[in-house]
């Protein structure tokens, strides 16, 4: 008799205008399903945000507690906060504060679940790779990219170069060609870096570009979405191997 595959529930706290995390995160887990027995379902709760500005990000972040509570009603096995810059714009090290607060919301609701943030996941993923110096690509306006750079550097990783595409409208960010990062990266100075962050934003599509850029540069290539899946798999105590998803999801880390 064939044993039924274990099914795990993946929860995501998502900006209301985000159109990418509910495609890229499931795509990565579905790719993993081709080589591993576990199966996954996906569940989201949304926070209002249309323009990627400091004011809207702060207002949106205040809704994350409600979202964590809603997702814990569904008894999700892991919960991901799917907006990197919302966390990084709230202050250095804020991912730790946010993750613990949202976890406690699930505990108080009688459905404790580990909480991963894309902000914390990116930092932790880069540390897992042993990256001490990186180059990053973002869709943000330059002041927000500066906050991201400062945040990453505060976590002990030097940012050698950064490129801002300066797209303020979040829907427009999500409408970018997933292969565009493979072209944009040519404008980044990657000399001497240990890794490239091809999309420091969970809304900017990039999954189709990751493996080809990694193969071309001969460097580990990671995105906020890939790092989020890595941390979710770690939290679920599962193997971190996903086909064609860059070094971090090679299973070696």
Image (cartoon, rainbow, N blue to C red):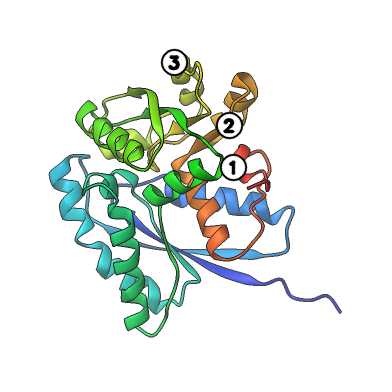
Question: Where is mark 2, residue-wise?
Answer: 220
**Picture residue at 37% right of the left edge, 52% below the top:** 82
Mark linked to residue 189: 3
Report which quarter residue 136 is drawn in: top left
Mark 3 lies on a secondary structure that is loop
In the displayed orientation, state which residue is furthest to the right. 1
Mark 1 lies on a secondary structure that is helix
Answer with mark 1 or mark 2, whichever residue precedes in sequence: 2
Mark linked to residue 248: 1
Mark 1 touches mark 2? (CB < 8 Å):
yes
Marks 1/2: CA–CA distance:
7 Å
Answer with mark 3 or mark 2, whichever residue precedes in sequence: 3
Marks 3/2: CA–CA distance:
15 Å
**Picture residue at 55% right of the left edge, 29% below the top:** 209
Residue 116 rendering spot, x and y as whole percentages: 42, 59
**Picture residue at 56% right of the left edge, 40% below the top:** 129
Marks 3/1: CA–CA distance:
21 Å
Answer with mark 3 or mark 1, whichever residue precedes in sequence: 3
Q: Is residue 179 above or below residue 233?
A: above
Evaluate whether residue 15 shows in this view.
Answer: no
Q: How many marks?
A: 3
């Amino acid at each position: 008799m064939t044993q039924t595959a274990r099914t795990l529930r993946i929860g995501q706290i998502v900006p209301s205008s985000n159109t990418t995390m509910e495609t890229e995160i499931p795509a990565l887990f579905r790719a993993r399903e081709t080589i591993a027995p576990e199966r996954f379902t996906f569940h989201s709760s949304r926070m209002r945000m249309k323009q990627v500005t400091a004011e809207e990000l702060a207002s949106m972040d205040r809704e994350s507690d409600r979202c964590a509570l809603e997702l814990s009603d569904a008894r999700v096995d892991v919960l991901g906060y799917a907006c990197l810059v919302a966390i990084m714009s709230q202050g250095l090290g804020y991912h730790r504060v946010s993750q613990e607060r949202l976890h406690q919301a699930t505990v108080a609701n009688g459905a404790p679940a580990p909480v991963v943030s894309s902000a914390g996941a990116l930092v932790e993923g880069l540390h897992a790779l042993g990256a001490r110096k990186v180059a990053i690509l973002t869709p943000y306006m330059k002041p927000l990219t500066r906050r991201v750079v400062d945040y990453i550097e505060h976590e002990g990783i030097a940012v050698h170069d950064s490129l801002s595409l300066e797209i303020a409208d979040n829907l427009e960010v999500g409408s970018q060609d997933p292969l565009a990062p493979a072209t944009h990266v040519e404008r980044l100075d990657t000399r001497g870096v240990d890794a490239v962050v091809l999309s420091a934003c969970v809304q900017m599509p990039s999954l189709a570009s990751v493996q080809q850029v990694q193969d071309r540069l001969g460097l580990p290539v990671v995105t906020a979405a890939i790092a989020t899946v890595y941390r979710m798999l770690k939290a679920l105590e599962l193997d971190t191997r996903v086909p064609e998803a860059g070094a971090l999801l090679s299973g070696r880390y």
